[in-house]
Amino acid sequence: LRPWLIEKIRQEDLTSVEHSGAAQGLTEVLIASATTIKQVMLEEFPPLRSHPSASTREGVLWVLTFLPSALSGSNFTPALLDSSLPALLNGLSDESEPVRDVAMRAGRVLIRAHGKANVDRILPRLEEGLSSDDYRIRLASLSLLGDLLSLLGGTSIHSASNSPENAGTSTQDDFRRAERAQAQLALALGKETRRSVLSNLYLARNDTESPVRQMAVTVWKTVVAITVRTLRDILQTLIKKILAALASGHLEQTHVAGKCLGDVVQKLGDGILPDLLPLLQNAILDDNNEATTRRGVCVGLSEVISHASRDAIVNYLELLTEVVRDALCDSVEDVRDMAASCFQALHQVVGQPALDEMVPSLLINLDSSSLENSARALRGLAGILKLRSRELLPYILPRLLSTQPITISHTNALAGIAEVTGATLYTHFHNIVPALLSSLAFVQENEDEEHEAALRECCRSVLANTDRVDNLISEIASKCSNDKPEIRQESCWMFQVLVEERKDRADFYEQLPIILREFLYRLNDDSTVVRKAN
C-alpha cells in the first residue's frame, strides 16, 4: 500500500484533491507502521522536493501538511523536523502558486502542532528566511513567524481593528493584547532571543517590497504595544544587525538597513547619535572591513543625516564631519562617491559650517610628512570639490599656490583637483598658469628633477581636464612675451602639451591662430633656449 500511495503522490495527471487524499492516506499508513516514517521522510521524499513536476512537489508538501498534526509530541522527532523545514521553505518560493499555497498551509500546521515544543529549531529557520533574496520567501517567513509569535504570545495576528466596524473601539484591546504577548514572548524566548527576533522584524518593516513591509508591520503591531519603548529596549541588538546588513555587500540588504537606521533616528530622536556615530566611524576606519562594508556604512550615515533634526546635526557637527571626512578619504572610489552623497546631505542641512569644519583639517593633512596621510587628504578634497568646487576653489587655491615654487605635495593636490573641477577651474587660470610657469622655471634652473616631473604632470592634468580651453589659451599666450626667457620657454611647452592632450577632442582649432602667432613670434626670440623650445 505504501509504494502505491507514494506513486500516486508522484503521478502528474492527478488533481490537487487526489494528491491531498493520497498524502493523507500515506500519513495514516506511516503512522500505523512507525518504523517506516523516517525511511520515507528522510530517504524517499528529499529527492521529490526538487522534482520537475509541480504536482509531485505539491504532493510531498501535502504529506507535510497532514503528518505534523497526526504525530504527537516526541513522535515528531528533530530529524523529521529538520527534514521538513527546508522542504517547506523551498516550497514557499516555488514558481507554482498551488505549491506555494500548500507549503504555507503545511508551515502553519507544523507551527500550530509543534511550534512551542520546537521553537529553538523553527525560529532560526524563519529568521534565515527573512534575509532571503526571494521576496516570496521573506513574505512567507514573516507570515509563519507571525503565527509562531502569536502562538507563543497567546494572541492572534489578525487584529480586530482591521475591520471597519471595530476601527474605533478595539485600539485599547489591541494594546492590552500586545502587552500580554510581549510579556509571554519574553518568558518563552528569553530576553536576547526576543530582542533578536524583534530586531529582524523591525528591519523587515523597511523591506523593498510593499507586501513584505505590510506583513512586517502587521506582525509587529500584534506583539509590540509601544514601538518607541520597544525600540529603546532592542536598540543595541538592532544596531548590530543594521551594521551587519550595511556591511553585507548585498545592495538590497544595504538599502533596507540604511532605511531602517534613518527610521530609528527619526523615531528615537537625536539622543542616539552620540552612541551611533562612533560605531559608524569605527566601521569606516577598520582596515579589516571590505570596501562594500564601508560603502554600506556610508549609506546608513546618509540616512542618519537625512532623518536627524537640524539642531542635532548642528550639535554633533564636529563628530559628523569627522565620520564623513574619513569616508571621503577612503581608497576606494565607490566608498568616496557614497561619502560625497553624505557630505551633500550634510551641506544641505547646515551649509557653510560643514565646509568650515572639514576643509581646514584636510589642507593641514595635505602637507603631512606621511605620504599616506597626504594622499588621503587629497582624495577627501577631491571628493568635496566634485560637489562644491565653485565655493571651495577660491578658498583652497590660494593656499596651494602660496609658496614659490609650488611644493610637491601642493602640486600633486592641484593635479588631483584639476581632474574633478574642469567645469569651474577656468575662472582661476590667471592665478594657476603664472604660478605653474614660475615654478617650472625655478626648478629647472635648480635642476630638481623630481619636483620638475611633478609640476609637468600637474600641468598636463590642468591642460587636459579644463572645459574652457579658450580661457586657457589666452592665459598661456599672455605669458609668451614675458620678460624672462624661462617663462617664455615653458609657455611654448604648455602649448605643445595642450595640443597633445586635447588632439582627440580637437576643441582648440578655433584658437589655432593665437597659438601659431605666438610660435611665429618666438622663432625670432632673443633667447636661443626659447627658439629651440619653439
Image (cartoon, rainbow, N blue to C red):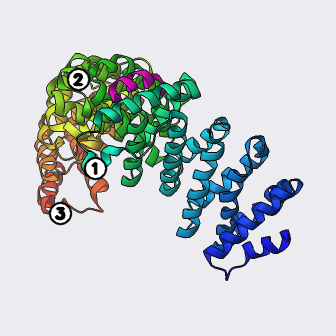
Magenta-drawn segment: 224-237
Residue 3 drawn at (x, y percent) = 85, 71
Q: Nearer the viewer, residue 243 or 13?
A: 13
The answer to which quarter of the image holds residue 402 is top left
Q: Which residue is under mark 2?
A: 313
Numbered label attached to residue 464? 1
Residue 342 drawn at (x, y percent) = 29, 35
Amino acid under disc 3: Tyr
As drawn, 458 above or below 83: above
Instruction: Give the spatial CA distance, label 3 vs label 2.
Output: 50 Å
Q: Is residue 262 left or right of residue 514?
A: right
The N terminus: image quadrant: bottom right
Q: Main secondary structure of the magenta part?
A: helix
Instruction: Give the spatial CA distance, label 2 vs label 1.
Output: 39 Å
At 57% from the left and 51% from the top, the residue drawn is: 108
Instruction: Give the spatial CA distance, label 3 vs label 1.
Output: 15 Å
Is residue 154 at all visible to an observer of this figure? yes
Q: Is residue 28 left or right of residue 253?
A: right
Q: Mark 2: few, some, or many residues within 10 Å (few <14, many ≥20)? A: many
As drawn, 198 above or below 313: below
Secondary structure type for disc 1: helix
Is residue 448 at all visible to an observer of this figure? no
Q: Specify which label sits upstream in the sequence, 3 or 1.
A: 1
- Queried whether the magenta region covers residue 228, the answer comes back as yes
Q: Which residue is under mark 3?
A: 509
Numbered label attached to residue 474? none
Secondary structure type for disc 2: helix
